[in-house]
Image (cartoon, coloured by chain):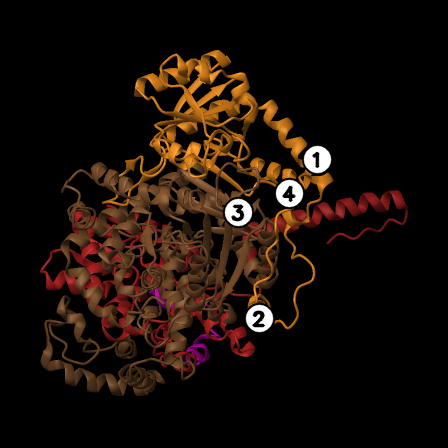
Chain colours: A orange, B brown, C red
Amino acid sequence: MPYIPPEHPNKSAFLKKVREALGRTHPILHAPDHPPLKSNIARQREKVRTIVARNDARMLTNINRLMENASFASWNVHRVESYEDAAATIARVARSHKVKNVIRSSEEIFKKIDVDKSLRSVGAPPTILASSRTRRRGQLKSIAFKSEMGVTGVGYAIAETASCAVIPRKGVARLTSLAPSVLILLVETEQILENLDDFFAITRLKRMESRSHGPNYYNFISGPSRTADIEQTLTVGVHGPGEVHMVIVG
Amino acid sequence: MAQVKTAEFKKISKQAIKNEKLQHSLDHVMEHFVSARSSIIDQDIGAENWELLRTRAASIKQSTIENLDYYLDLVDKNVRRNGGYVHFANDANEANQIVLDIAKRNEVKTVIKSKSMVSEEMGINEVLEKAGIEPVETDLGEYIIQLAGETPFHIIAPAMHKTKEEVSDLFQDWLKTAPTQDIKRLCIYARDALREKFATAEMGISGANFVVAETGTVCLVTNEGNGRMTTSAPRVHVVLAGMEKIVPAIEDLALFLRLLPRSATGQRITSYNTFASGPRNQSDEDGPEEFHLVIVDNGRMNLLKDEEMREALRCIRCGACLNHCPVYKKIGGHAYGWVYSGPIGAIVTPPMTNMKVASDLPYASTLCGTCRDVCPVKIDIPKLLLHLRHKVAEGSSSERGSAWMERLFIGQWHKTVRNRKSLERRVKLARIFLKPISRNGKIKKLRAPMVSGWTNSRDFPALAPKSFGDIWKSGLSGNNGNRNQ
Amino acid sequence: MLRSKFQNSFHKNIAQIVSLLSNICYLRRVVRRRGWSRFSNRPKAKLKAALCVTCLIDQFYPEVGEAVVKVLRGQGVDVSFPEDQTCCGQIAFNGGFRNDAADVAQHFMDLFENEEHVVVPSGSCTSMIKIYYQELFKDDPEQLERAKAIAEKTYEFSDFLVNVVGQSDVGASSYGLITYHDACHLLRELGISKEPRELIGNVDGVEIQEMHDSDSCCGFGGLFSVKFPDISAAILEEKIKNIIDSGAGTLVANDCGCLMQIRGAMQRKNLNVRAVHIAELLAEGE
């Protein structure tokens, strides 16, 4: 059980001020009427069942929409049928950039796609970015910042916004998808969801079902890092990867 | 606490208007934001559905504000359950102290910051520097203005007023880089300079676009990647959030993530959305070990107390109102004198800081209403401006700030229009006074106080020799027959 | 009228049917000969409009008022002018001086509340009366009722012509290219943008040429124009540029505040574009 920090000493005075500002003397005891807050686990399970069924039925449409929206958002999109083709694509990208220093995470998908073999064949054997693989604490960061390319799996891919939800956990470091300048995200077709509402509904169920109330951190990656802060001129590749590849396999 | 320089509004706005380069930037940038927003809405959503989204968002935000104590309590409980600390700061000083204490306790030497308007309100950078800690802005626009020692010019594009030459000069001075006209190269300079800080900083300070009460999740909406860096690389992560940033449930983010990027930059979605609910989970490979959410009041309570002004707290800081404002387009952000500019700046600055010092702001608008049309949470900005004007003109002693000349003018106006006889009598007098300066129905130079500015660039019409009322009485009324019948 | 004399129920039914049919034939004969008015006690009603001429038109542009009267009368409207009118109070309200504004607004309501229709040749004044009177009197239930009632019967000039009189072609004629400026209150508070364009489009001999950003503010804003004259002038510059770029020889707007602002710059710069109120255009060539 993680440590639960104590209440801040100013909390109750602060909330009292808010209540007074709103013209109330007593705190609210029941949740305001807001539908998502009233969900329970059975209802949510049913909702997610419907969502999964719908996404299964519309898989082809979702794949196409994901690909279309990803191209619009400056992803490099690769659609492959087999895991071998996926591995080959990764090797091709590495070769085209002449990279030597590759890092990767270790989601389930890496058991299906032999990324290590294909990258070794182009002279870029990947390092798994995990603390179990490093000898000292700060080493993970320095490996990450030195890397040129990263390969990682995703939790989900959302067609509406061409977003990949990357969820850190054991074996999946945050920096894998952030530090290198080229990033490859591996998406299996079963992971594709139609829209943001689907994702958040599933997230809610996962939270309800997990004792630890879900991961404390996840990211959507929806395109390359970009800025237009200087003279409103778009520049791609600032602090995050400037080139992002989505490999859709299945 | 960031200084309130709104007393210089007239002076700075005049300078901005005369600055040709600035006018050119403003034209170009505002045009871009306006058309990007309207294209993506047409393309993705359509006008009718957009209306529905806005209405729903307005209602969710309004109900959250009306129940703010409940939701703040929920945020507190949930973030702490996730292992994070929650602090409540009444004002900028308290917030600064909280951040300093966290930094000192963790022996922090360098702080990396991603975009946070609340941190501008606090003036945290100066506070950290005084304590011997180096604050580094990582958002490129904020980094540029940090180097230049300026305040943000626009909520979304803080350095839009800087030309690439000016940026090159800044980088040359501070980073010792070679001068260049290539914008991509300038970005690489910034990237390299900041990368080293990402790797070594002990603490990251971020803002929060949304704070989900039910899950204790802070949502960041960014494009560059510095938001992710700030919340992943250092050992300590501090979030600064205004108390109004709350949304009730995680599902609500779907709605707001549809509204915010489209309203702000015309994007379907930004490159990154970060959802941080606490320190790293035990089995995570990396991430901060300590997580602090600092909830800040700093004047928001004044907006909350006033039932009329409460809706201003719905704001999701998209900047659409700035982009569409004809006044902002001419004067830019610095004239507003504080952290928030444009229409939203005009309505929040006086109540949050000082009604008297900022008394010009509610009047610096033609009430054209375009801001209200584009606000994703349907804040009725013209109505709030009128409400603030009412306070400045007839409010309590701490609020009143009208010039005595204006009171005199309105007093005289009232006497004049009380009834027709009074009006006709006074207009007759006025005609006599104005006759010497009226020529061919025009007045070229009005030398009266308050109104003289008109004739600097425009002719003023002369009073008609006979009013409509006179003409009506001398015959126009008679012929009520319908000639075409 | 025929009366049934038969006691027998079957014959009674037949008789009733015949009686009904015969009544219908009688009615048809009467209507064909004398029209429906035979059955109505009321004389044929003429639309009545009380003109709120607005202080700017009253004192600076009375010719616009004359044009309004001419156009309305040309459509058979019975135009009256409550002579004690002065101002709707907007300038005080916008300045934040609600006490003064309330006093003047009550005088306005005293004058106009018993009229059938109140017609106002200005978008900003109309929105003051229709919308902001209710804001002004929101804490005064009695005055609020009056404000709501008067809102129901107050119309901006072009709105009245097209939607109440039901006429979008007033038989005017003019010449050349016309460009139209969407005044802010008219467009965004009252939602009126189609009606003026219809009216202008139906003027013989003219063609509408939309300018770039016709719906962007001209920079007048009442008080704003004298409190922040530099900003007001800068915003106006852009509007003038758009008008010139449209190539039109005439600028039409429904608000004399905007016209005062635009004309002021046109005259100062000696530009050839004439800026007129829609009523003036519609009164041409009649």
Question: What subunit carries mark 3?
Answer: B
Part of the protein shown in magenta: C105-125
The quarter holding residue B327 reads bottom left
The N terminus of chain C sits in image quarter? bottom right
Q: Which residue is mark 1?
A: A46
User: Which residue: 67% across, 42% down?
Assistant: A211
Q: Amino acid at mark 1?
A: Glu
Gap between marks 1 and 4 measured at Cα: 22 Å
Q: Which residue is mark 2?
A: A13
Determine crowd level at label 4: few under 14, some 14-19, many 20+ residues with C-alpha closer than 10 A: some
Query: What numbered label is drawn on residue B279?
Result: 3
Determine crowd level at label 3: few under 14, some 14-19, many 20+ residues with C-alpha closer than 10 A: many
Query: What numbered label is drawn on residue C105?
Result: none
Q: Position of residue B467 (x, y in %)?
A: 25, 77
Gap between marks 3 and 4 measured at Cα: 13 Å
Question: What subunit carries mark 2?
Answer: A
Dot 1 and dot 4 within a common chain: yes
Q: Is residue B215 above or below residue A128?
A: below
Residue B327 visible from this viewpoint: yes
Question: What subunit carries mark 1?
Answer: A
Gap between marks 1 and 3 measured at Cα: 31 Å
N-term mark: 2 or 1 = 2
Query: What numbered label is drawn on residue A212?
Result: 4
Determine crowd level at label 2: few under 14, some 14-19, many 20+ residues with C-alpha closer than 10 A: few
